[in-house]
Image (tube, helix red, strand yellow):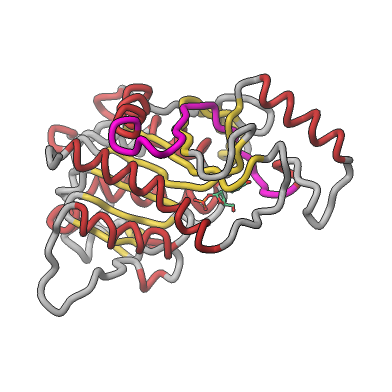
């Protein structure tokens, strides 16, 4: 199948839906979002979306929705509050604020991947054009102090491989995990200009399948290595140019790239992993730091919408 055929009459949509079955379905149920193409006019509801911002927790994405609403000066009808569009799914929460979709993806690749399958199809059904996806996350830094913003330049898995390995029909499939370089650079420029007080770096992000042993921590329920083994491993990562570790960027990059969507990952470091494992920052500091990627995304969106 050629890319043009994959684009499925894409004169009015530029998301590449690499699935010939979807166009013949009269109703496509986006089960985990609590939406469907048969019961809702998805184009009318979501056709103007230009930015899809996502992060792990429902609370963070609700807070981002409220923040971006204020930043873009979008008025809600009197007496109404932002509504969680996917609340009936009890899986993810999703808010629409003008051209911005703010959606939670849970923890780890399986949870993010289910949400992305459905959001990519949502973009297709809604005939969205020129959409940018941004992950607003948290991470552990390698040699970077807490509160640092890391814009991902490249992504690797726990074995330093730059692709997502997944199993389909009993076979191993490899999908390159590629992010848009120009978008990352634009985010960096916006950050330098608008958020001069923050430490912002561009780097190589390692994505793992676990928070504890997968990231070489000594404080999980199991640990069959010692502190020296851990530090030697982190030193190898540092020498390979790894700046931070989190748990979703590999699938995010691979899926955005496969769907022809420009994607960026911006994470704030919660600790320097060369100094420890436990995330023990006070809650108020944690909230302040988690807000930093949101501030960068808001500044970028405002610039793109010519609001600054
Ligand atoms: O988006 P978040 O902050 O949830 O991402 C990182 C990676 C894991 O999902 C989680 C682990 O604490 O934080
Ligand atoms: O160390 C960390 C902190 C946040 N998220 C991660 O995946 N790792």
Q: Position of residue 139 (x, y in %)?
A: 56, 44
Picture quadrant of residue 280: bottom right
Q: Position of residue 298 (x, y in %)?
A: 28, 46
Tell me which residue sits at (67%, 33%) in the image.
158
Q: Is residue 155 visible?
A: yes
Tally the marks.
Answer: 0
Q: Is residue 20 visible?
A: no
Q: Position of residue 155 (x, y in %)?
A: 53, 29
Q: Nearer the viewer, residue 229 or 17?
A: 229
Picture quadrant of residue 12: top left
In this view, which residue lies farthest toward the front?
197
Q: Is residue 169 above or below residue 239?
A: below
Q: Nearer the viewer, residue 114 or 189?
A: 189
Q: Nearer the viewer, residue 130 or 154?
A: 154
Tell me which residue sits at (27%, 36%) in the image.
15
Q: Is residue 210 magenta?
A: yes
Q: Is residue 263 above or below residue 180?
A: below
Range of residues picked out in magenta: 192-212
Q: Position of residue 230 (x, y in %)?
A: 80, 36
Asked if residue 86 lies left or right of residue 282, the reply is left
Q: Is residue 95 magenta?
A: no
The quadrant of the image that shows the C terminus is top left
Tell me which residue sits at (72%, 48%) in the image.
277
Q: Nearer the viewer, residue 183 or 110?
A: 183
The quadrant of the image that shows the N terminus is top left
Asked if residue 41 lies left or right of residue 298, the reply is left
Tell me which residue sits at (33%, 61%) in the image.
94
């Amino acid at each position: 199948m050629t890319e043009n055929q994959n684009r499925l009459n894409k004169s009015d949509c530029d998301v590449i839906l690499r699935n010939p079955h979807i166009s013949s379905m009269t109703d496509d149920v986006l089960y985990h979002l609590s939406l469907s193409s048969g019961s809702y006019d998805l184009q009318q509801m979501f056709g103007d979306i230009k930015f899809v911002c996502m992060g792990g927790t429902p609370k963070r994405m609700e807070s981002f929705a409220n923040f971006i609403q204020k930043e873009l000066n979008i008025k809600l009808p009197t007496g109404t509050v932002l509504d969680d569009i996917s609340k009936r799914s009890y899986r993810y929460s999703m808010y629409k604020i003008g051209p911005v979709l703010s959606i939670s993806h849970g923890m780890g690749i399986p949870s993010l991947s289910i949400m992305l399958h459905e959001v990519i199809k949502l973009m297709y059904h809604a005939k969205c054009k020129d959409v940018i996806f941004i992950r607003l996350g948290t991470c552990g830094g390698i040699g970077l102090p807490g509160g640092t913003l890391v814009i991902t330049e490249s992504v690797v898995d726990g074995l330093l491989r730059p692709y997502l390995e997944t199993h389909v029909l009993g076979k191993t499939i490899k999908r390159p995990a590629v992010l848009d370089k120009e978008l990352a650079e634009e985010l960096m420029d916006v950050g330098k200009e608008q958020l001069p007080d923050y430490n912002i770096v561009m780097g190589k992000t390692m994505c793992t399948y676990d928070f504890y042993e997968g990231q070489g921590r000594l404080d999980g329920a199991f640990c069959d290595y010692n502190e020296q083994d851990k530090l030697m491993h982190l030193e190898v990562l540092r020498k390979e140019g790894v700046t931070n570790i989190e748990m979703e960027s590999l699938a995010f990059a691979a899926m955005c790239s496969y769907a022809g969507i420009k994607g960026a990952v911006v994470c704030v470091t919660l600790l320097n992993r060369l100094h420890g494992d436990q995330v023990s920052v006070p809650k108020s500091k944690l909230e302040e730091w988690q807000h930093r990627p949101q501030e960068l995304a808001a500044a970028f969106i405002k610039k793109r919408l010519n609001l600054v």
